[in-house]
Image (cartoon, coloured by chain):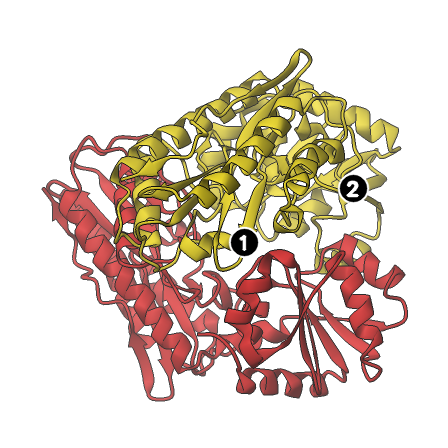
Chain colours: A yellow, B red
Amino acid sequence: MTGYRPARIAALRDELAVEDLDALLVNHLPNVRWLTGFSGTSALVIVTALDVVLLTDFRYATQIEEEVGGAARTIIVEESLWTGLWELLATLPAAKRVGFDSAHLVHRDFQRLLEQGNRWQWRPTADIVERLRERKDQSEVAAIRRAIGMAESALSMTLESLAPGLTETQLAGMLEKALRDAGSEEYPFPTIVASGERSALPHARAGDRRLATGDFVLIDFGAVADGYCSDITRTVVLGKATAEQREVYDIVREANARAAGSVRAGMKGMDADAVAREYIHARGFGEAFGHSLGHGIGLEVHEAPRLAKTADALLCVGAVVTIEPGIYRPGWGGIRIEDDVLLTEQGSIILTGFRRDLLEIS
Amino acid sequence: MTGYRPARIAALRDELAVEDLDALLVNHLPNVRWLTGFSGTSALVIVTALDVVLLTDFRYATQIEEEVGGAARTIIVEESLWTGLWELLATLPAAKRVGFDSAHLVHRDFQRLLEQGNRWQWRPTADIVERLRERKDQSEVAAIRRAIGMAESALSMTLESLAPGLTETQLAGMLEKALRDAGSEEYPFPTIVASGERSALPHARAGDRRLATGDFVLIDFGAVADGYCSDITRTVVLGKATAEQREVYDIVREANARAAGSVRAGMKGMDADAVAREYIHARGFGEAFGHSLGHGIGLEVHEAPRLAKTADALLCVGAVVTIEPGIYRPGWGGIRIEDDVLLTEQGSIILTGFRRDLLEIS
């Protein structure tokens, strides 16, 4: 997944022409990685009509050769990235109007542009690279599929050991070890293991609560392969489910199935969201589904597009999105079922295959 | 570690008076947590002479009551945090000059202040809360000590299973499971397991390289307890060390011992850095120690103060800093030995106790 990516750079140059920019300053690290392959934590990239230049520091001198190859000219800065940037721009006389990413440049660095970088005309831009990243190419889909495979095999192994008395944190550790054994490079976000009443907290992490018979156990986690994330949630019951647990679970399962089965390139994110939301509402739990239906995944675990009540952008071919409806009842518990779906010209493909019926673990 | 923290709010109010501000907008989440106890991922806080108000969204309605208690007035916003902010500020007539954090507010949100928030006078500030966070109180030091205990017990267990043929990723998984079993809430940063030649990469992560006899295995990791991080590195040899491995190791060990033994509140970060750097330079490896000596740890694994060539600020009582000299020789391997040190009125205390002699694992 490294090296020269002419199609990505070409697509970005088209956008620069549309926005009447001579160059773009890229400082958001996932955007840096998508354009150049570089996965380090210190970098600035300048893209012009002719050049792609990556600035980083000493620590990455070896890594940058392996990862970037011919994708960019690379400069190891002596002092700071910013000093390196002024020196670089001075060698690129055609770069006068330079875009920067308004969502990722902090005010302090914006002040640097206005003060030390005042020889150039700085233009705020919004999500130029993020929009390009929405449309995954084959290699990206393949990496996401690998990350899903790692997550599903780790979940299978972990559910075999699920038992009353374990803490949520211990269960998270078992799952994470299985993810590592499956080859996951890291964790795309802090693993959520929320049991019993805590499953009603939509953003609980793993805590020291011990699993008990009768609990819902909500597990939301992912793997990373070649930098690309998977994101999956399953909710199981420890022991026998009550009729009420089963009834509410089946509402979430049906909402998941309807949304995952109907999400398509060309529809709006808000319309996909509505499929699940209206079903849950009609079944009487509208207030209990307080978050959005889903989000894109890729080099980041939350990226474009959004599937939410207010998302009026059209979903594009090549996007990989999560479908994750939930019902959360304080004091009782919560259920979320999350799958990853690829939008193609020929319709959508549910990439996650892990079973969705209510598992009773005993 | 939750709830009312009058000393922290009082210290911040003193700073606001010095800076002639009526209020401070806090958007950096570790600063939010330090001031209010709230650990969620969506929040804005306003602190004035009389009020502390925390804005968050629906997802955290339950969590916020448990975590914040009386530390802040809490508001669950209907729409966005920003809309909630304008509404809140309109109810605080004394708040005219409002500071924001220049290092943490992105340009897009700065534009919101200038446009939608143009009824108020916005003043950039630098690291006001971060400077207060440098000086840990007893409860914070206790949490860091717990996080160190978790890390050290996990490392002990993991070294017992270290063997040729394991991949770096598998070893990371074993270590992380042991961290979870010890109670770690999450991982403060992606675990580094770098073996053989890869140990010469100062910022390698864990990869699919298999450990082999004769390798240096560099392990840099930490635990989290009540939100507070530990950060420790040990480098071991798989099998018998060569004379050259032992010689270079002992230089790093001595540099670590000299710096950890001499770092004190009241000295400059650059002077602590120089203790290790000059020793390594005198032994002929100056070029091979390219990064800084260390950094503060707390709610973030990299926070103030810095211990670096250019750090001219005085180190304060209550800071907890890492001491992590290293020598990296491309193609041969690298060594880093990292400890966590508390600076007190009575001198410094090395909090990490894990043995520092060269372990030969067989």
Quadrant position of the N terminus of chain B in the picture: bottom left
Tell me if A188 is positioned left or right of B167 in this view: right
Q: Nearer the viewer, residue A293 or B334?
A: A293
Percent of width and height locating residue B306: 49, 67
* Relative to A22, B254 lies left or right: left
Above or below residue B355? Residue A118 is above
Residue occupying image coordinates x 41% and y 25%: A149
Residue appearing at x 52%, y 22% in the figure: A351
* Neighbour tally class for label 2: few under 14, some 14-19, many 20 plus, Cα within 10 Å: some
Q: Name the chain letter of the residue that bears numbered label 2.
A: A
Residue B176, percent from left and from top: 31, 48
Q: Tag 1, which chain?
A: A
What residue is rendered at 60% in x and 33% in y?
A255
- Between the C-alphas of marks 1 and 2, the distance is 37 Å
Instruction: Name the quadrant containing residue A281.
Output: top right
Which numbered disc covers residue A126?
Answer: 2
> In the image, what residue type sits under mark 2?
Ala
Dot 1 falls on a residue whose secondary structure is strand
